[in-house]
């Protein structure tokens, strides 16, 4: 379903019933992400959280996709997670990725009242780091040999509420305190 048009590009929600959309997303991911995700990984994301999958199309062809989810984290905060973001190389540096991330964040906040949004990206992926850090994401941890290609990753988190800036151990203690 068409959400909006920006600079002649159509931003859409993923249609779970459309097998062609799934095939196009699968080709885009396998062709342009360094991590060789199993088809079952994004099929799980797309079927469980289709409301957090958005595509960008040009003449019916998907040239960009973001796949995300929202879940409770340790029963004390709600965490959004950006699992995959891919833009066809010939369409990069046009703000498409930024629009997709903004769309995802806006809907996670509006629909699920998320406390934070998390993702991982390769330490050598300067473009992704620049994008996410420009949107307020913070590097919180280096994950050594995280990817199958043995590259390290950074975990990045976008804190959105006070819960996101408080260590979980302290949140659990605060929730047990009696109200005065």
Image: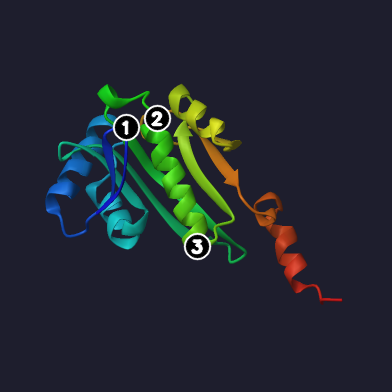
Labelled disc at residue 57: none
| Residue drawn where x is 17% and y is 60% of the image | 17
Mark 3, mark 1: which one is toward the viewer? 1
Labelled disc at residue 95: 2
Q: Is residue 12 above or below residue 70?
A: above
Labelled disc at residue 7: 1
Q: Nearer the viewer, residue 172 or 91?
A: 91
Q: Which residue is mark 3?
A: 112
| Residue drawn where x is 39% and y is 50% of the image | 68
Return the x and y of residue 141 as percentages of the image width and height: 59, 37
**Residue 86 in the figure: left or right of residue 170:** left
Q: Secondary structure at mark 2?
A: loop
Q: Residue furthest right?
A: 180
Residue 2 visible in the displayed image: yes
Are the two marked residues, 2 and 1, in contact with CB atoms closer than 8 angstroms?
yes
Which quadrant holds residue 63? Answer: top left
| Residue drawn where x is 77% and y is 66% of the image | 174
């Amino acid at each position: 379903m068409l959400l909006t048009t920006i600079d002649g590009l159509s931003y859409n929600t993923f249609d779970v019933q459309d097998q062609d959309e799934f095939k196009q997303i699968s080709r885009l991911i396998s062709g342009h992400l360094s991590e060789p995700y199993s088809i079952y990984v994004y099929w799980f994301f797309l079927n469980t959280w289709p409301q957090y999958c958005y595509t960008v199309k040009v003449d019916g062809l998907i040239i960009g996709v973001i796949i995300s989810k929202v879940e409770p984290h340790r029963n004390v905060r709600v965490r959004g997670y950006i699992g995959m973001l891919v833009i066809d190389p010939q369409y990069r540096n046009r703000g498409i990725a930024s629009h997709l991330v903004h769309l995802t964040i806006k809907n996670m906040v509006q629909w699920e009242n998320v406390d934070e949004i998390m993702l991982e990206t390769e330490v050598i992926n300067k473009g992704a780091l620049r994008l996410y850090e420009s949107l307020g994401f913070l590097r919180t941890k280096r994950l050594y040999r995280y990817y199958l290609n043995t590259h390290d990753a950074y975990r990045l988190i976008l804190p959105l509420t006070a819960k996101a800036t408080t260590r979980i151990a302290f949140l659990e203690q605060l929730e047990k305190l009696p109200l005065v």
